Image (cartoon, helix red, strand yellow):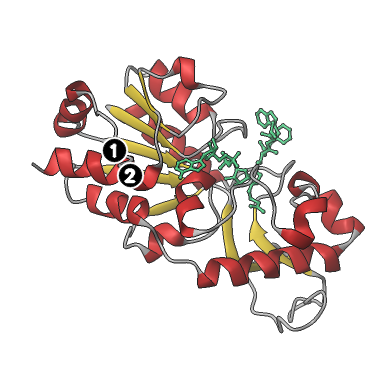
């Protein structure tokens, strides 16, 4: 069954005329690569755990070995995954518009593997490891139950932003500046529940941008968008990019 949906000409015109396009992606853009979404069912062993609990300083403090096992499971899953047509469409978009700012909430690195060269990783990256005491990026012996920092011996942690932690200043500032400057803002594959990432669409609207949501189901913010394209990113984005390129 064709998944393609009608894309209003005004969206195509807005992207063709845009000086600066800002795109925010969430876990939904990686769903067709086989990476479970954050709120989607966690597979098997992890089904009984709450990701909000595991992805938090308190969760790590309570059971660092369990949290490391969760992140190792996700790293292995993502390492076997491939970018899908949605990731590739956004990589192509950068050559079709004068300026593109791509902000992702995802930590899977699939945008970069699809060829996107400038990606703002709002929540960090699954494959980066940091010292929990110094915060610096470190290389660790990944076979240990809880790897430790080679410099100071403190526990190592995944280089991601947990719930209750602040976003890296450069990522926060760059993303909100882009949202406030862009002419067209695309929100792709996110439930728009997690802040401050979900505030980017509002910042774009306040600055007068045309804001478009691409998601197979309505989200918390759907009513705040100028357009909502209800479809899968792997179908809608390639169609959208192809329409602009014509
Ligand atoms: C912070 C890394 C200061 C870890 C993640 C107001 C302002 C500021 C903060 C808050 C606030 N209100 C509440 C807070 C606290 C909290 C928050 O937002 N809580 C939520 C639950 C209410 N925010 C924070 O703690 C942030 N820190 O602001 O610091 C502060 C601190 C405390 C209190 C105040 C201020 C830090 C948040 C970062 C958390 N880390 N990830 C890791 O991955 O392990 S967030 C995590 O959720 C992922 O990054 C994920 O991307 C992100 C958001 O979820 P989505 O991407 O939207 O994924 P989800 O599963 O929800 O939805 C998927 C969507 O895809 C669905 O809509 C589905 O329909 C769609 N979909 C499915 N298939 C497809 C598809 N779409 C397209 N195509 C398909 N095929």
Quadrant for ligand 1 reads top right
Q: Are marks 2 and 1 in contact (CB under 8 Å)?
A: yes
Residue at image coords 56%, 44%: 169
Q: In which quadrant is the N terminus drawn?
A: top left
Residue 146 position (above or below residue 118): below
Residue 199 position (above or below residue 97): above
Callout 2 environment at 10 Å: few (<14), some (14 to 19), or many (20+)?
Answer: some
Is residue 60 visible in the rendered image? The answer is yes
Q: Where is residue 170 in the image (x, y as percent from the top left)?
A: 50, 47
Q: Where is residue 183 in the image (x, y as percent from the top left)?
A: 27, 27
Instruction: Please tell me whether mark 1 sits on a helix, a strand or a loop.
Output: loop
Q: Which picture quadrant has residue 82? A: bottom left
Q: How far apart are marks 2 and 1 (CA)?
A: 6 Å
> Which residue bears the numbered disc 2?
235
Pointer 2 or 1: first along the chain: 1
The numbered mark at residue 4 is 1
């Amino acid at each position: 069954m064709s998944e393609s949906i009608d894309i209003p000409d005004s969206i195509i015109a807005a992207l063709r005329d845009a000086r600066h396009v800002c795109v925010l992606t969430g876990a939904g853009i990686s769903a067709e690569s086989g990476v479970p979404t954050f709120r989607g069912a966690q597979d098997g062993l992890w089904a009984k755990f709450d990701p909000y609990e595991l992805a938090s300083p308190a969760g790590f403090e309570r059971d660092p070995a369990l949290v490391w096992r969760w992140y190792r499971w996700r790293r292995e899953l993502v390492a076997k995954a491939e970018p899908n047509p949605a990731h590739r469409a956004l990589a192509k978009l950068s050559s079709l518009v004068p300026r593109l700012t791509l902000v992702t909430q995802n930590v899977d690195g699939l945008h970069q593997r699809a060829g996107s060269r400038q990606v703002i990783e709002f929540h960090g990256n699954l494959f980066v490891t940091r010292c929990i005491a110094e915060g610096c990026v470190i290389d660790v012996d990944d076979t240990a139950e809880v790897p430790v920092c080679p410099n100071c011996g403190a526990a190592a942690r995944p280089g991601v932003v947990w719930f209750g932690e602040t976003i890296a200043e450069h990522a926060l500032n760059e993303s909100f500046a882009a949202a406030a400057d862009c002419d067209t803002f695309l929100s792709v594959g996110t439930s728009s529940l997690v802040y401050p990432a979900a505030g980017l669409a509002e910042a774009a609207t306040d600055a007068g941008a045309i804001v478009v949501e691409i998601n197979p189901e309505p989200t918390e913010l759907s009513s705040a968008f100028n357009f909502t394209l209800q479809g899968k990113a792997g179908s809608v984005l390639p169609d959208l990019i192809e329409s602009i390129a014509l």
